[in-house]
Image (spheres, rainbow, N blue to C red):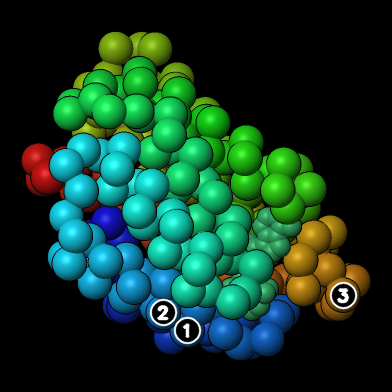
């Protein structure tokens, strides 16, 4: 979560720029507000397990972020945290399955599917790539590296799509030709997770 908060700090302006093209220019601000609260909350009251870290982080995102992305990401993290349970350590298979549960919860909550030009266009390919890599025997770091690549490709692939969900959908065909801000932030979060696991923390 620290790597995610750092990445959000670094890329906040870029996320807001993407949202200014097809939204209301607040995605970077929303993400930063949420992840700053997460950073502070985890420092104040450090949870003892990965699952508890994600439950607290998700709760903070839901309560601190006004935009659509707060409840969506918050729900995702809470569902992943719940799926991880009380385990002190999590292997690749367990993490991939938990992430799948979290991404499906985003889809249910927002009523969006792959191809609607949302964060799901980065999240679904990431989870599928991770599952495939784990099934092929990759360790978690390698599986998350594959997820990171897939999330980045998925985000860039939103450029030619027309938005069917969220604020960008109000633009109709004018949403075509721009990368979805939520897909870009999802790619950022997957990259942060991959980096954190790759560096052993
Ligand atoms: P808001 O749209 O309320 O201003 P943000 O700008 O923080 O909130 O987040 C916008 C992003 O949220 C979009 O780029 C999109 O990826 C994501 N999003 C919006 N609505 C949905 C939805 N129904 N399902 C999945 N993701 C969504
Ligand atoms: Mg916005």
Circle nearer the N terminus (3, 1)? 1
Choose top left, top right, bottom left or bottom right for residue 95.
top left
Neighbours of disc 2 within 10 Å: few (<14), some (14-19), many (20+)? many
Distance of mark 2 from mark 3, alpha carbons?
A: 25 Å
Q: Nearer the viewer, residue 200 or 51?
A: 51
Indicate the quadrant containing the N terminus: top left, top right, bottom left or bottom right.
bottom left
Q: Nearer the viewer, mark 1 or mark 2?
A: 2
Which residue is rendered at x = 52% and y = 56% of the image?
73
Task: Name the residue located 70 percent from the left edge and 80 percent from the top edge.
Answer: 23
The residue lying furthest to the front in this view is: 45
The quadrant in which residue 168 appears is: bottom right
Q: Is residue 5 above or below residue 190?
A: below
Where is residue 183 shown, x and y percent of the image?
Answer: 57, 59
176 to 133, vertically: above or below: below
* Residue pointed to by mark 2: 33
Circles 1, 2 touching at the beta carbon (< 8 Å) = yes
Q: How many marks?
A: 3
The residue indicated by pointer 3 is 170
Q: Which mark is residue 8?
A: none
Rendered location of residue 114, percent (x, y):
71, 43
Which numbered disc, 2 or 3, marks the residue that appears first in the sequence? 2
* Residue 29 tag number: 1
Q: Quadrant of ligand 2?
A: bottom right
- Whether tag 2 and tag 3 are in contact, CB under 8 A, the answer is no
Query: Which sits in the foreground, 92 or 135?
Result: 92
């Amino acid at each position: 979560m620290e790597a995610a908060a750092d990445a959000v700090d670094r890329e906040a302006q870029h996320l807001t720029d993407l949202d200014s093209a097809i939204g209301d220019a607040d995605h970077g601000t929303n993400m930063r507000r949420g992840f700053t609260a997460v950073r502070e909350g985890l420092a104040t009251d450090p949870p003892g397990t990965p699952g508890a870290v994600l439950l607290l982080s998700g709760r903070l995102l839901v309560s601190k972020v006004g935009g659509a992305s707060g409840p969506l990401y918050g729900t995702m993290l809470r569902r992943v945290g719940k799926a991880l349970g009380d385990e002190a350590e999590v292997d690749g298979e367990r993490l991939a399955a938990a992430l799948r549960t979290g991404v499906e919860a985003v889809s249910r909550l927002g009523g969006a599917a792959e191809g609607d030009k949302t964060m799901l266009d980065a999240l679904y390919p990431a989870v599928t790539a991770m599952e495939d890599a784990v099934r092929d025997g990759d360790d978690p770091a390698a599986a998350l590296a594959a997820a990171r690549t897939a999330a980045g490709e998925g985000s860039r692939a939103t450029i030619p799509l027309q938005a069917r969900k969220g604020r960008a959908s109000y633009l109709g065909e004018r949403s075509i030709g721009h990368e979805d801000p939520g897909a870009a932030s999802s790619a950022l979060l997957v990259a942060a997770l991959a980096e954190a696991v790759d560096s052993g923390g």
